[in-house]
Image (cartoon, rainbow, N blue to C red):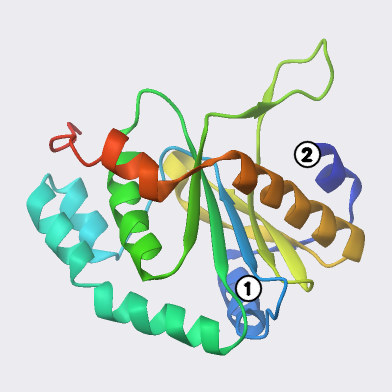
Amino acid sequence: MRELLDQAQGVRLDLASYTADFEERFWRIGGEDFWKLECLQEYQETGFPSWEAFRAGQWERSLHLIEDLRPEFEQYYRRASAAGFRLHRVRVVERPVTPYTQWELEVLNLRSQCGEQVTVVDGLREPRDPDADPVRLPDLVVLGTEAVYEVHYGEGGSPAGATRHTAPAVVEGARGFIQRLHRSGESLESYYPREIAGLGAPQL
C-alpha cells in the first residue's frame, strides 16, 4: 500500500482544505461505500466533549457523553443509508491497548450499534522489502470511487491535513486493500465484549 501511494501524484491539502474537500464529496459516495483505515494508537480529538472528559480523567462522564451521541449517530447512519452507501472501518489495535484506543473503541462500539461496519485487526506493519524495517501503514479514507485521502498527523496524533488521490487505480487499490483487511479482521461486535467492556477506567 505504501509503495502505491508513494508512486502516485497526490495533492497535499492542509486541514481546512481537507475538511472542506471531504465534506463536499462525502454525500455522493454511492454504492462503492465509505472505507476507513485507522492505524495510530493516539489521536487528538480537541473539541469533542467525550474526549475532553476522558483526557481530564473523568471516565464515567466521558462514557455518558458518548451515549448522549446515540440519536445523532442513528440519524447520521440513516441518512447515509438513504443516500445509498454504507460505512466501513478497520481499526488497528496494538497491544497493550492504549488509554486512547480504549476510549475510541467505546465510541466505535456505539457507531457499530448504529450502523457502521467496524472490524479490529492486530497491530500491522508493512515491510517495503525483506531487508528493510517494517513501516507503519498509513491512515486512509476512501470515498467511493472518487478519492482516497492519506490522512496526516502531527505530534501526538494532532490532525495535519491529508494527501488526496483521485487516479482510479490508486482509489481502487486503496479500497481493495482496506476491504481485504476488513474481511480478515474481527467484528467489533465480538471483539468489544471480550477485550474492552470489562476494562476499568484507563490510567492516563
Answer above or below: position of 82 versus 186: below
The type of residue carrying mark 1 is: Ser
Q: Position of residue 145 (x, y in %)?
A: 79, 71
The local secondary structure at tag 1 comes to: helix
Q: Residue at x 17, y 65 (%)?
A: 65
- Look at discs 2 and 1 and give the one toward the viewer: 2
Q: Is residue 52 left or right of residue 109?
A: left
Q: Residue at x 22, y 63 (%)?
A: 66
Query: Can residue 45 be seen in the rendering of this structure?
Result: no
Alpha-carbon neighbours of circle 1 within 10 Å: few (<14), some, or many (≥20)? Answer: few
Q: Residue at x 54, y 55 (%)?
A: 89
Q: Residue at x 27, y 42 (%)?
A: 193
Q: Is residue 98 left or right of residue 76?
A: left
Q: Quadrant of residue 12?
A: bottom right
Q: Quadrant of residue 195?
A: top left
Work out which quarter of the rendered image holds the N terminus and state it. top right
Q: How many marks?
A: 2
The local secondary structure at tag 2 comes to: helix
Work out which quarter of the rendered image holds the C terminus and state it. top left
The circle on residue 31 is none
Residue 143 or residue 22, whichever sits in front: 143
Which residue is disc 1 drawn over? Answer: 17
Between the C-alphas of marks 2 and 1, the distance is: 23 Å
Alpha-carbon neighbours of circle 2 within 10 Å: few (<14), some, or many (≥20)? Answer: some
The circle on residue 2 is 2
